[in-house]
Amino acid sequence: MATTGTEHMARTLNTLMNGEYQAAHLYFQAGAWASQANLSGSSGFFLGHASEEMMHMEKLLTYMLEIDVPAKFEALPEPEIKSNDIVGLIKQIYEHEKMVTQRFLSAAKEASDTGDLSTFEFLQWYVAEQREEESLFRDVLEKIDLIGDGPHSLYFIDTEIAKISAKSAAAASSGGASGAASGAA
Ligand code: OFO
């Protein structure tokens, strides 16, 4: 490890990298669950999001290699889908993203407190990304609320999520934190 201050961050960066890998795992499982439930729009959305989480993980790995911090991958816990309906699943994922936001904010604070300004600057991308992800999932939940409980609500919810997914793919291909997460996550 070459950079002063970064040594303090090595464990934290590994935690973040493994956390993004775990997030991808959760989204892959959510995509599989939605497909089984015949919710093809939601399935595409979650699978697309899983790929984004893999990109987030790789970005951390690349940074660690660049600054000579040893990267260590851990065993992945089994991803748990806690709800048997799409609304419950979106709520679970929203809570998950809020927890990830706290993890990045606390890592950014640690970087600042230890004088590791390079890592502090690097983490700003994730801070912006998490802000946008939280906003995205809040929007999805608000749409679900608007759709309400009618006889075809599941169909309309899935259609809305498919639209969001398409916007997400377009935004992600434009790159950057706001590209990856606005209208996507
Ligand atoms: Fe990596 O953005 Fe979600 O967790």
Image (cartoon, rainbow, N blue to C red):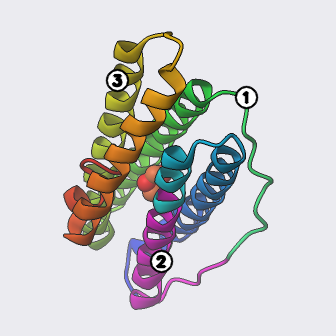
Number of the front mark, 2 or 3: 3
Between the C-alphas of marks 1 and 2, the distance is: 31 Å
Q: In the rendered structure, find residue 58 and report the number of the disc placed on it.
A: 2
Quadrant housing residue 137: top left
The three-letter code of the residue at mark 2 reads: Glu
| Residue 159: x %, y % from top left | 41, 38
Q: Is mark 3 on a helix, strand or loop?
A: helix
- Is the residue marked 1 within 8 Å of ligand 1, measured from its CB? no
Q: Residues within 10 Å of mark 1 (few under 14, many from 20)?
A: few
Q: In the rendered structure, find residue 84 and report the number of the disc placed on it.
A: 1
99, 146: nearer the viewer: 146
Is 7 left or right of 115, judged from the image as shown?
A: right
Q: In the rendered structure, find residue 143 and report the number of the disc placed on it.
A: 3
Between the C-alphas of marks 1 and 3, the distance is: 19 Å
Q: Is mark 2 on a helix, strand or loop?
A: helix
Is 36 left or right of 148, judged from the image as shown?
A: right
| Residue 80: x %, y % from top left | 75, 42
Q: Residues within 10 Å of mark 3 (few under 14, many from 20)?
A: some
Contact? badges 2 and 3 (CB < 8 Å) = no
Where does the magenta region start and end? Answer: 49-72
The three-letter code of the residue at mark 1 reads: Asn
The three-letter code of the residue at mark 3 reads: Lys
